[in-house]
Structures are given as C-alpha cells and as structure tokens.
Image (tube, rainbow, N blue to C red):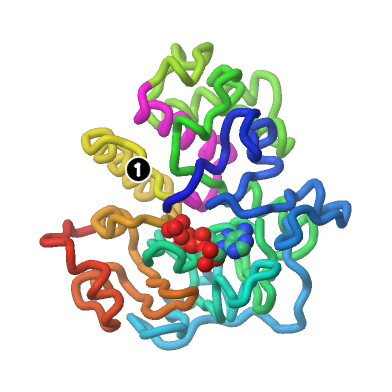
C-alpha cells in the first residue's frame, strides 16, 4: 500500500513505544488502541480497539469454490475460519461513503487482498487487527465475534502485524532483543529467561543468530530488518500474520528472500498470512485465497490460482493484465 510508514521513531505521530500493546494502524488511520478502548476512551473519532456487540450469530460460508462479489466461500470440510468479516461496512467519521461496504470473507489458509489504491485494503487489515470497529456487520475471530477486552487480548496474541517499511517499523533506540521481546512483555506472555529464549527462537526462525540480539536496527540491511520485524511478530507464536505490503520496500533479491521466508513459515508453522500487495505475483506465490476489492466492495474472491488465472470480474482481469506470467503457489 502507499502512504507513510505506520510505525516509526518517536518523532512521528504514530510511535513505536508500545507497538503491540497499542498496535499502530496500517495505512495511517486514526486508531484508539486497546488500552484506551478498555477504559472506554476513544481517540481519533473513527475507530475503537474492540468491536461492539451485535445481535447476530456467527455464520459459515456458502457454496464452495470461487464466487463473485460478496458471497463467502464454504469452509474446508466445515473448518471454522480463523478470522472472518461478516457483512462488514466501515465508514470513517465525516466521510461521505463507506471505505468498506458489506464485505464478507473468511481467512482459512493464507489470504491475499488486492485492489487499486483507495479500494479499502488498509481499512480491511485494520478491521482484521481489531483496530477498527465495524459501522455494521461483525468481525469473527475463531468463529466468535470480536468484542470485549478478553477477546481482543486473545486476538492481540494470535494475530500479529508486519508492516511495510522495515526502516520505519523498528525503533532505532532499541536493541534487537528488546524490539523482538516487546510483545512478550506488553502482552504478559513471558519474562526473564523464558522471554530471552523465545526471542532467540523467533530470531532463529527467521535465520538470524544470537549476535543480532545486542545490535541496533541501523546496523542491519532492509531485508534483515524485515526479518527482525517478522521475528517480533512470531515471538507470541501467533496463528496469523497480517502483512501490509511486506516486501514492497525491499530490493528485488531481498524481496525474493523474504517471500521465501514467509512461505517457509506458513508451510512449516501452519501460519496464515493475510497480505495486501499491489504485486499479484507475490500474492500468487504466498496466498491460497484472494479477495479483490474495488471501491470498498468485494468484487471477487476464491482460490488464488482461479482468481488470478481465470478472473471472473473484469476489474480483476484489468488488475492482472500487466503481468505477463504468474508463478504458481
Ligand atoms: N482516516 C481516514 N479518514 C477518512 N477517510 C479515510 C481514512 N483512511 C482511509 N480513508 C479513505 O478510505 C478509503 C479506503 O482507504 P484505504 O487506505 O483502506 O485504501 P487502500 O486500498 O489501502 O489504499 P492504498 O493502497 O493507497 O493504501 C479511501 O477513500 C481513503 O481516502
């Protein structure tokens, strides 16, 4: 996605001091973090950190396979999706039209979200992160509506963000051991020797050794920084990574390395990656399913290979028309 980095050094509006206790929004939206929401305080006006109750009960998807528009796909063998949007509409305060309109889809494996600038991708990621509250409809986490502090806390641990720009997303004043270990402290998951071991394990998972621990972000390349950011996301042992253009700030060679890392993690750890990318070849490489957004509406969704190789909607065809050849997932 375009736009300014979403987490950054303290001189930027959205800082890195508490990046995962009060996660920064993707795409620079004004967000009230969970700590404020827990006390009922709302900052920015548009959003809250947890969703409000609705009376509807969670629902499963409809017919199997690719479908046009907004019909959810059937679960694989009735499997409950890890995350889902159910008829979600979101309108920013003061906006004339919703940024997302009546969106329904489920996250089971890895999911790509594609669409042109302004189509609602960032808004969708922030809804999935529990950082925006739907104006109507529901966000479901493991089949239950995302509402109440306990549910949001569970989501914070299980669903971790990876941001676009690894130069902006790591606090330059903090050593790597503290950066990677911060979610453990802020979510109260581990401390002391247990936390140190989890940090080492997370760094090892992304191919970085213990020498990394005492160093600062500026000592690393872009690709290494993105690995550190991914280690920070992995340290809570999440089920889902929500990634905002995770390789777009990297050069081509490094991009391939980080895509290979994400692919290894999703296959090896059974991690779901929900990813926004302008580059459909990245989505083709990593995502089982793809959702296509246009002007805030889901115009097509289904298995990535079907959506990208045999698009049902002219808009999808237009989106991928510039790509001569696509790799297989
Ligand atoms: N904080 C906000 N306040 C008001 N309108 C907003 C806000 N954030 C986004 N929008 C509007 O909502 C719509 C969807 O924006 P969003 O950032 O979700 O799109 P996007 O697909 O992620 O775009 P990009 O690829 O350029 O990042 C756009 O019309 C945008 O102008």
Q: Residue furthest right?
A: 39
Compare residues 147 and 222 and report the one nearer the observer. Answer: 222
Q: From the image, which quarter does the C terminus lie in?
A: bottom left
In the rendered view, tell whether residue 234 sits above or below residue 123.
above
The answer to whether residue 127 of the structure is visible from this angle is no
- Residue 248 lies in quadrant: top left
Q: Is residue 271 magenta?
A: no
**Residue drawn at 62 percent across, 45 percent down:** 24
Please tell me which residue is depicted at 74% across the width and 59% down the height of the picture.
Answer: 48
Q: Percent position (x, y) of residue 161?
A: 54, 46
Q: Which residues are magenta?
A: 221-243
Q: Residue at x 53, y 39 (%)?
A: 233
Quarter of image, res 262: top left
Ligand 1 within 8 angstroms of badge 1 C-beta:
no
Q: Residue at x 78, y 73 (%)?
A: 53
Q: Position of residue 173 (x, y in %)?
A: 60, 18
- Location of residue 325 with respect to 180 vertically, above or below: below
Q: Whole-percent x and y of residue 51?
A: 73, 66
Q: Which residue is mark 1?
A: 247
> How many numbered circles are shown?
1
């Amino acid at each position: 996605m375009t736009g300014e980095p979403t987490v950054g050094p303290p001189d930027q509006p959205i800082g890195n001091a508490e990046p995962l206790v009060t996660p920064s929004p993707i795409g620079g939206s004004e967000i009230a973090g969970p700590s404020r929401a827990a006390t009922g305080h709302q900052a920015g006006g548009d959003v809250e950190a947890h969703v409000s109750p609705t009376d509807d009960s969670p629902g499963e998807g409809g017919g199997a396979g690719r479908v046009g528009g907004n019909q959810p796909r059937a679960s694989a063998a009735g499997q409950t999706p890890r995350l889902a949007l159910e008829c979600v509409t979101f309108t920013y305060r003061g906006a004339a039209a919703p940024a997302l309109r009546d969106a329904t889809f489920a996250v089971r494996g890895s999911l790509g979200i594609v669409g042109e600038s302004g189509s609602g991708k960032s808004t969708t990621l922030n809804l999935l992160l529990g950082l925006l509250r739907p104006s109507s409809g529901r966000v479901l986490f493991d089949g239950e509506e995302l509402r109440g502090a306990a549910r949001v806390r569970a989501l914070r641990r299980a669903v971790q963000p990876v941001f676009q720009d690894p130069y902006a997303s790591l606090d330059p004043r903090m050593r790597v051991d503290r950066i990677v270990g911060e979610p453990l402290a802020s979510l109260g998951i581990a401390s002391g020797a247990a936390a140190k071991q989890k940090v080492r394990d997370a760094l090892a998972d992304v191919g970085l050794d213990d020498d990394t621990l005492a160093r600062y972000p500026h000592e690393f390349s872009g690709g290494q920084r993105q690995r550190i950011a991914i280690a920070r996301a992995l340290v809570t042992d999440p089920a889902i990574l929500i990634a905002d253009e995770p390789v777009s700030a990297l050069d081509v060679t490094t991009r391939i390395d980080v895509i290979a890392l994400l692919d290894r993690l999703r296959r090896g750890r059974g991690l779901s990656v929900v990813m926004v990318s302008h580059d459909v070849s990245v989505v083709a490489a990593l995502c089982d399913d793809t959702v296509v957004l246009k002007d805030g509406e889901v115009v097509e969704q289904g298995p990535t290979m079907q959506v990208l190789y045999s698009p049902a909607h002219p808009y999808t065809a237009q989106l991928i028309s510039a790509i001569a050849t696509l790799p297989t997932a």
